[in-house]
């Protein structure tokens, strides 16, 4: 591991025990800290909060307006022709979900099949959907893909190119005026992770701590999961927490937007590079459908009506997966699983 020392919804206030990911309630920790975190993150997520049953399933079937005018009866869904697409919004939720809706609608049109968008809060839920046969296509994070146990049932379809490259880094960040200079200086401080299956936002930072013989539950006074890289960045910039782990692509986006967040933090440590998260498909879709889907994704950046959607997802374009870029994540996950 190489380090560079200078170089909506309320979050679950849970700790994880070792590498097994067993949740332990943080009832013993400071109530004031928890309330502050909840209030701050609720303020960021309120616009996105809605009844999950109303937003989880979105039918993108195109209906002839003239036929609809003469027939008020609901159109039956052909379950055998349904394409279920699972997503998890770890960037700006409102923009991200709208982007996925547009992409799902585009796939429906190109494939000639109805599509249903399945939105879930965490990558663990996405993996459960895949394992239970509840999703046909899934947008996965690096860590979620490399942690998935039933890999024989799925295959990576494409991977993302972001800011010109198909890889990224994990950044450990602190506020720009913080006195923290090393990972050890985070002892007794507060920290924000993103998702328990996020490689840059949880798995590789935990691996970094292992290199200095530390665990999150021992090093930090409190830590949380924000389920959003942007929220973790904002939490450090706003001094809600002392440190956080984010993907380098989110930091780069903040620099491009000049929103002041990246300028308010300092990079404390940098991981090795890792491949961007893949789009995966269930092999049971069949070679013909998988081949058509691959073509759709590889050509997606050429569709003018999808440019804004792809920009919202920080995707330049999609390419064939380079499996060597997942060697480092697999190494990290294997080592975490050994202890």
Image: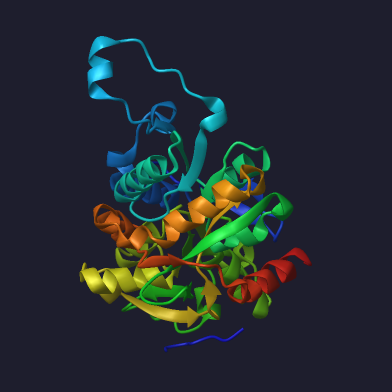
Q: Is residue 305 above or below residue 164?
A: above
Would residue 85 be seen by someone viewing this image from the given angle? yes
The location of residue 63, given as percent across then percent down, is: 31, 26
* Render colour scheme: rainbow
Depth check, front residue: 265 or 26: 265
Depth check, front residue: 86 or 215: 86
User: At 45% across and 46% down in the image, what residue appears?
Assistant: 11
Depth check, front residue: 94 or 45: 94
**Quarter of the rendering containing residue 267:** bottom left
User: At 51% across and 74% down in the image, what residue appears?
Assistant: 186
Q: Quadrant of the N terminus?
A: bottom right
Left or right of 218 in this view: 29: left
User: At 65% across and 48% down in the image, what residue appears?
Assistant: 283
User: At 33% across and 31% down in the image, what residue appears?
Assistant: 62
The number of numbered badges drawn on the structure is 0
Residue placed furthest toward the front: 288
Left or right of 208 in this view: 256: left
The location of residue 304, given as percent across then percent down, is: 24, 57
Would residue 28 be seen by someone viewing this image from the given angle? no
Q: Is residue 112 above or below residue 297?
A: above
The location of residue 126, given as percent across then percent down, is: 56, 45
Q: Is residue 277 above or below residue 97?
A: below
The location of residue 144, given as percent across then percent down, is: 59, 56
């Amino acid at each position: 591991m190489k380090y560079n020392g200078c170089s909506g919804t309320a979050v679950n206030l849970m700790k994880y025990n070792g590498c097994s990911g067993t949740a332990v309630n943080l009832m013993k920790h400071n109530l004031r800290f928890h309330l502050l975190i909840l209030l701050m993150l609720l303020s960021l997520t309120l616009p996105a909060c809605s009844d999950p049953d109303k937003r989880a399933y979105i039918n993108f079937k195109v209906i002839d307006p003239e036929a609809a005018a003469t027939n008020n009866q609901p159109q039956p869904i052909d379950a055998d022709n349904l394409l279920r697409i699972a997503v998890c919004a770890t960037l700006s939720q409102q923009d991200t979900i709208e982007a996925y809706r547009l992409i799902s609608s585009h796939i429906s049109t190109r494939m000639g099949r109805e599509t249903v968008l399945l939105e879930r809060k965490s990558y663990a839920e996405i993996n459960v959907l895949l394992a239970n046969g509840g999703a046909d296509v899934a947008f996965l994070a690096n860590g979620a893909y490399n942690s998935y146990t039933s890999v024989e049932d799925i295959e990576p379809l494409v991977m993302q190119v972001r800011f010109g490259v198909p890889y990224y880094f994990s950044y450990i960040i602190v506020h720009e005026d913080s006195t923290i200079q090393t990972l050890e200086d985070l002892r007794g401080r507060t920290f924000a992770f993103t998702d328990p299956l996020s490689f840059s936002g949880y798995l590789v930072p935990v691996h970094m701590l292992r290199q200095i013989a530390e665990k999150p539950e021992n090093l930090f006074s409190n830590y949380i999961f924000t389920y959003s890289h942007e929220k973790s960045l904002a939490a450090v910039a706003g001094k809600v927490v002392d440190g956080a782990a984010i993907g380098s692509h989110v930091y780069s986006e903040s620099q491009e937007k000049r929103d002041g967040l990246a300028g308010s933090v300092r990079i404390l440590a940098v991981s090795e590079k890792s491949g961007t998260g893949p789009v995966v498909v269930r092999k049971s879709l069949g070679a013909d459908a998988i081949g058509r889907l691959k073509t759709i994704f590889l050509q997606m950046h050429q569709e003018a009506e999808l440019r804004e959607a792809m920009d919202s997802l920080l995707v330049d374009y999609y390419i064939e997966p380079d499996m060597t870029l997942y060697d480092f994540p697999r190494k990290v996950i294997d080592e975490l699983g050994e202890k």
